[in-house]
Image (cartoon, rainbow, N blue to C red):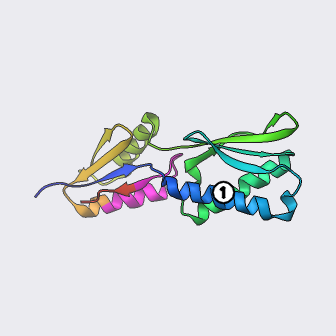
Amino acid sequence: MADSSFDIVSKLDRQEVDNALNQAAKEIANRYDFRGTDASIAWSGEEAIVLSASSEERVKAILEVFREKLVRRNISMKAFKPGDPVASGKGFKITGSLVEGIAQEHAKKISKKIRDEGPKGVKVQVQGEELRVSSKKRDDLQAVIALLKDSDFEVALQFVNYR
């Protein structure tokens, strides 16, 4: 019998992130508490998002609105890494970046966790920014998925190509 396998990846649906950003921008434009604060949220290149307002509290409130919109669209909070509020001119800015792919150090942590706590006979291979988990038993693969869902890593994990 051939081995069953699945891939562990960390990917974003760009369209959902864009929709969340547009919804946050609409809410910021319409909310009374953001009037007169020069509040805005916008893309800055492919990977970065810039939030700006006239005060540090307002820019943090914009960040909370954006996070709320991301959660509603089933995008993990681990996929967006905001920076600290920085004074720029007469306002404040937060520059955040979107995180995709599993870095080598995180891949090593995940594979070590599977080897140490997972079922015996499960093999893990690091393939660039994703991991392939294979085993002769499908039940072992289900156990690995459950183990990883219960664990907390700094990246958002998705399980794809289950066969």
Q: Position of residue 77 (x, y in %)?
A: 59, 53
**Residue 163 on the magenta segment:** no
Residue sitting nearer the eye, 158 or 46: 46
Q: Quadrant of the N terminus?
A: bottom left
35 lies above or below 52: below
Q: Which residue is painted at 53% across and 59% down in the image?
A: 16
Report if residue 98 is visible in the image. Answer: yes
Q: Which residue is painted at 66% across and 57% down in the image?
A: 67
Q: Which residue is painted at 18% across and 56% down in the image?
A: 136
Q: The residue tagged with tag 1: helix, strand or loop?
A: helix
Report if residue 122 is visible in the image. Answer: no
Q: Residue 69's image quarter?
A: bottom right
Q: Badge 1: few (under 14), some or many (20 or more) residues near its Cα, within 10 Å?
A: some
53 lies above or below 17: above
Q: Quadrant of the C terminus?
A: bottom left
Mark 1, residue position: 67
Q: Which residue is painted at 40% across and 46% down in the image?
A: 113
Would residue 19 be found to the left or right of residue 162 on screen? right
Would residue 52 be found to the left or right of residue 43 on screen? right
* Mark 1 residue type: Arg
Would residue 163 be found to the left or right of residue 33 on screen? left
Q: Position of residue 64 (x, y in %)?
A: 72, 56
Residue span colored magenta: 142-158
